[in-house]
Amino acid sequence: MIIPVRCFTCGKQIGDKWEPFSQRVRAGDKPAKVLDELGIRRYCCRRMLITHVEIIDEFLKYPQVSAKRRAEVA
Amino acid sequence: MDIKLLSKEQDTLRFVLSGVKPAFANALRRIMLSEVPVMAIDDVMILENNSVMYDEILAHRLGLIPITTDLESYNLPEECTCKSELGCSKCRASLSLEIEASDPVEVVYTSHLKPENPDVRPVSDKIPIVKLAQGQRVKLEAFARLGKGRTHAKWQPVSAATYSYDEKAGTFTFLVESTGALPPERIVLEAARIIGAKSVDFQEQIGGLEKS
């Protein structure tokens, strides 16, 4: 749903690495290079970021739409 | 017994331990994983939460946040003199959070947590806790306590504690990677102290048997 705070396997804190990771990968950097530079060495931690989908952004559209609809009705 | 430091960078410590048996090296490693106490949030009072995240998931995420630990000023709750379930200022530190989103999407970070004691605060300020849509509110009070890794992995001070054993040379090359709650050298030191205390306890138990 949202980036996990820690790696599921080893417990390394990876929560604060998601934003720099996704920004740099979207800008065209190679994921492997970004992970190396963020200091994420083990493959258990690397898969946390590589395979993550930030679904909470989709959920957030519902309260936004319903707030807009409520404003229209009122 | 001899310890030679190889490197220390941020939260990772590498050293070579020699002149001990594998049983001792492994005891040191396992104590670092499961017996060295660190702080973690373990009680959360949610006063308001109309975010898209359920209370229990929010509480679980808060629990996993590594918290800087001050071992001198705090007691383990089970060893504290207050003997209270709620805890006292010597075995509990509170962190509060109150936020309402004014932007269409607002990310709540660990920097929004207000610690009661500035020495007991999240290790990183940039961990996302939850995301809020405009108008959504979260208000809560969280209590951090000392605990041990054998109870729950959130109290584990290390994300990696490993060694490789060179049978010919009889050396153990250790790697200790801290979560940031305690400096890695402190974790090794505490683990050594705990082994010592356990050995003394064992000796006393055996001594008691001999007398009877």
Image: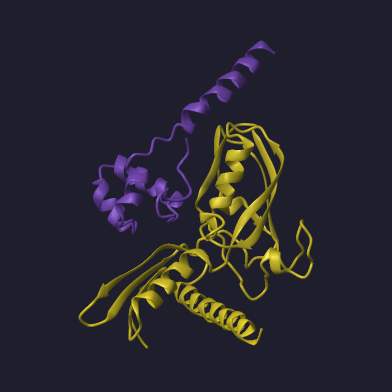
Which chain is depicted purple?
A
Q: Is residue A23 visible?
A: no
For the point 54% across and 22% down, the residue is A62
The percent position of residue B125, horizontal first and vertical second, equals: 53, 56
Could you say which is closer to the camera, residue B115 or residue B194? Answer: B194
- Direction from residue B203 to residue B4 in the image, left or right: left
Q: Is residue B86 left or right of residue B176?
A: right
In this picture, is B194 found above or below B56? below
x, y percentage for residue B154?
Answer: 53, 55
How many tags in the picture?
Answer: 0
Does residue B98 lie above or below B115 as drawn?
Answer: above
Residue A67 location (% of width, % of height): 62, 21
Q: Is residue B173 left or right of residue B137?
A: left
Q: Which corner quadrant holds the N terminus of chain B?
A: bottom left
The C terminus of chain B sits in image quarter: bottom right
Residue B100 place in picture, x, y as percent: 66, 39
Q: Residue furthest top?
A: A73
What's the residue at 79%, 60% (across, down)?
B84
Q: Is residue A10 above or below residue A24?
A: below
Looking at the rendering, which quadrant does residue B7 occupy? bottom left
Which one is nearer the viewer's eye here, B186 or B108?
B186
Q: Residue furthest left?
A: B168
| Residue B147: quarter of image | bottom right
Is residue A61 visible to us here? yes
Q: Residue at x 51, y 27 (%)?
A: A59
Q: Nearer the viewer, residue B55 or B33?
A: B33
Task: Report the residue at 22% width, 83% height from top.
Answer: B169
Colour in which the image shows chain B: yellow
